[in-house]
Image (tube, grey):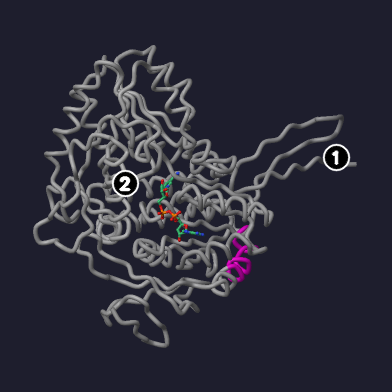
């Protein structure tokens, strides 16, 4: 493909001249990015370019920070109940546009429409929790801490905050942050993944109608340069990041070094334990959904299945059965169980892992390579894949694949399973399937992941609980949404008073 120049911008990939080049949203206006380069956005089921993301610059970030700084004093002083009303309006608009938004998520990400709807619903739930801001923002006080002296704690917003999002939940992940930050009285900047910017474009079109003064919410499209500018900018007080572990760690280091409050959620390698006493009929569909839902592109996806003792044979047979029966295709079509992965590059990466699993000596029981989807020959599809005999020393037993590849690693007993969970540097989520209360209790108590499922395949805390992992899956202190969000986005001011 030839590089082209359109409207003074060089596009490195696109040949389609009618493909929309996206704008940023800064200070209440849709404005062009100052970046020259663009990245193509694909519909991964069709392999076609549907938009272009501008690679914004540090100057664009600076503009957004200035507009957010300008908006901050008035927004901070806006009564929390009025700020909450803006979130009620936002919730209403998201409901009205629920189907439209879900379809955009499927179109730019590839997950099936039901999966997209689920993710948009989870995002809306964050807005609902933020609507309770006035209650959640309350401080506390004690009279008479000494004779004639009272003490009061108030929660106050930090200032300008920003969120940097990954590709796998284009609508939901920024909603883990924006509603909470804004209801707390902060002003905000979102940097979506350059691979999936269209859901946030739609969401910001809705935010335009939520009675938010210009500059309260801002959208800056782009990649690494934008992220680094956010980390470095002295006008930004808090940074929330979600993405892979190496970038999460780099962002945490860089932004904390610049004096900011940071929460950085990283990658995952999630282990799922099946005990011999599990109810296989009810457990295995949930387990298969954990491995293959969203084509394995969830930070909570099962990656390594640890069947204990005699659970191995049945777990393996059922995984194979499910993998063989799944219908892979365009997520917009009814009856499709699994969509494509995000990009041609990511597909190659997942295929590389399958090759590596084979060469490391794992048994490739179901091979998802070479899958053809009728009418979608250009789509980025990988079929459900099952490996057996995987060990933690193999690359596929160790690294995050982020694709529909299940690695079965038989273990002797629960202690053996726990030793593998503990031995991995990531600790995002883990699950156990059992009918033994004792085994479940032991596992939940001792597993070092911060999100644990008991007979639940995807242990996703809802919006009023904290979300985030441990070890190399999380860098920071306060987790995402729930009560932690109100703490992350506020400072506690203590006033001690005496009246003469
Ligand atoms: P990524 O780390 O490649 O990108 C995340 C964000 O960082 C994007 O906005 C991207 O533009 C930016 N970025 C990428 N490389 C950068 C660099 N070198 N310097 C600065 N910024 C950079 O992640 P991804 O591929 O978009 O998302 C998948 C990853 O996200 C997986 O590892 C997954 O486990 C993780 N994830 C974690 C959670 C969680 O809750 N822990 C949730 C969703 C996704």
Q: Nearer the viewer, residue 270 or 66?
A: 270
Residue beneath the point at 36% across and 62% down: 195
The residue lying toward the viewer, choosing from 216 and 40, is 40
Q: Residue furthest left?
A: 374
Q: Decide: is 150 above or below 306.
A: below
Query: Residue 437 or 149: which is nearer the viewer?
Result: 437
Q: Is residue 216 above or below residue 176?
A: below
For the N terminus, the image quarter is: bottom left
| 469 displayed left or right of 409 | right
Rounded to the nearest angstrom, the CA distance separating label 2 from label 1 is 67 Å
The percent coordinates of residue 341 (x first, y second) are: 27, 53
- Image quarter in which the C terminus is found: top right
Residue at image point 34% right, 84% down: 4
Q: In terms of secondary structure, where does tag 2 sit?
A: helix
Numbered label attached to residue 327: none
Near mark 2 (Cα within 10 A), the count class, few <14, some 14-19 or many ≥20, is some
- Looking at the rendered image, the disc whose residue lies closer to the viewer, 2 or 1, is 2
Asked whether the residues under the numbered discs 2 and 1 touch, taking CB atoms below 8 Å apart as contact, a structural biologist would say no
Side of 23 relative to 258 (left or right): left
- Most common secondary structure along the magenta stretch: helix
Where is mark 2, residue-wise? 353
**Left or right: 97 as drawn, with respect to 61:** left
State the residue position of label 1.
498
First along the sequence among labels 2 and 1:
2
Question: Where does residue 273 sit, x and y in percent of width and height?
Answer: 33, 25
Q: Where, by quadrant of the figure, is residue 444 drawn?
A: top left
For the magenta stretch, what is the residue range?
A: 65-76
How many marks are shown on the rendered structure?
A: 2
Dot 1 lies on which element?
A: strand
From the top left corner, tell me how far across and down residue 269 is, in percent.
40, 38
Find out whether residue 335 is within the magenta segment.
no
């Amino acid at each position: 493909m030839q590089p082209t120049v359109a409207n003074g911008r060089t596009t490195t990939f696109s040949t389609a001249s009618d493909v929309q080049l996206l704008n940023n949203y800064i200070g209440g206006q849709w404005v062009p990015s100052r970046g020259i380069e663009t990245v193509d956005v694909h519909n991964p089921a069709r392999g076609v370019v549907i938009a272009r993301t501008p690679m914004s610059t540090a100057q664009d970030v600076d503009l957004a920070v200035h507009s957010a700084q300008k908006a901050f004093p008035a927004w901070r002083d806006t009564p929390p109940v009025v700020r909450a009303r803006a979130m009620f309006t936002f919730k209403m608009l998201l409901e009205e546009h629920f189907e439209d938004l879900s379809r955009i998520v499927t179109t730019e990400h590839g997950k099936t429409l039901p999966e997209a709807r689920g993710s948009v619903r989870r995002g809306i739930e964050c807005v609902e929790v933020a609507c309770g801001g006035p209650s959640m923002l309350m401080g506390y006080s004690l009279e008479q801490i000494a004779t004639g002296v009272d003490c009061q704690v108030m929660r106050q917003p930090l200032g300008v905050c920003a969120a940097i999002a990954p590709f796998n939940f284009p609508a939901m992940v920024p909603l883990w942050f924006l509603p909470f930050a804004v209801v707390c009285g902060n002003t905000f900047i979102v940097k979506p993944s350059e691979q999936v910017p269209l859901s946030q474009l739609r969401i910001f079109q809705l935010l335009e109608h939520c009675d938010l003064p210009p500059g309260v919410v801002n959208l800056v499209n782009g990649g690494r340069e934008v992220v680094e500018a956010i980390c470095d900018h002295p006008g930004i007080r808090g940074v929330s990041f979600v993405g892979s572990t190496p970038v999460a760690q780099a962002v945490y280091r860089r932004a904390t070094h610049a004096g900011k409050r940071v929460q950085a959620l990283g990658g995952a390698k999630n282990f799922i334990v099946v005990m011999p006493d599990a109810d296989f009929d009810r457990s295995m569909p949930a387990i298969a959904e954990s491995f293959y839902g969203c084509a394995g592109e969830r930070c909570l996806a099962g990656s390594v299945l640890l069947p204990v003792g005699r659970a191995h044979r049945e777990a393996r047979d059922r995984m194979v059965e499910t993998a063989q029966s799944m219908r892979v295709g365009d997520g917009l079509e009814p009856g499709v169980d699994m969509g494509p992965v995000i990009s041609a590059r990511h597909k190659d990466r997942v295929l590389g892992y399958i090759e590596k699993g084979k060469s490391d000596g794992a048994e490739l029981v179901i091979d998802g390579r070479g899958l053809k989807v009728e009418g979608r020959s250009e789509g980025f599809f990988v079929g459900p894949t099952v490996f057996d005999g995987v060990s933690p020393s193999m690359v596929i037993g160790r690294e995050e694949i982020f694709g529909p590849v299940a690695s079965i690693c038989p273990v002797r007993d629960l202690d053996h399973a726990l030793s593998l969970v503990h031995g991995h540097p990531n600790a995002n989520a883990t699950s156990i399937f059992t009918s033994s209360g004792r085994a479940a209790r032991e596992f939940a108590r001792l597993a070092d992941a911060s999100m644990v499922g008991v007979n639940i395949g995807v242990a996703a805390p809802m919006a009023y609980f904290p979300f985030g992992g441990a070890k190399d899956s999380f860098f920071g202190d306060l987790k995402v949404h729930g009560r932690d969000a109100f703490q992350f986005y506020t400072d506690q001011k203590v006033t001690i008073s005496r009246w003469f």
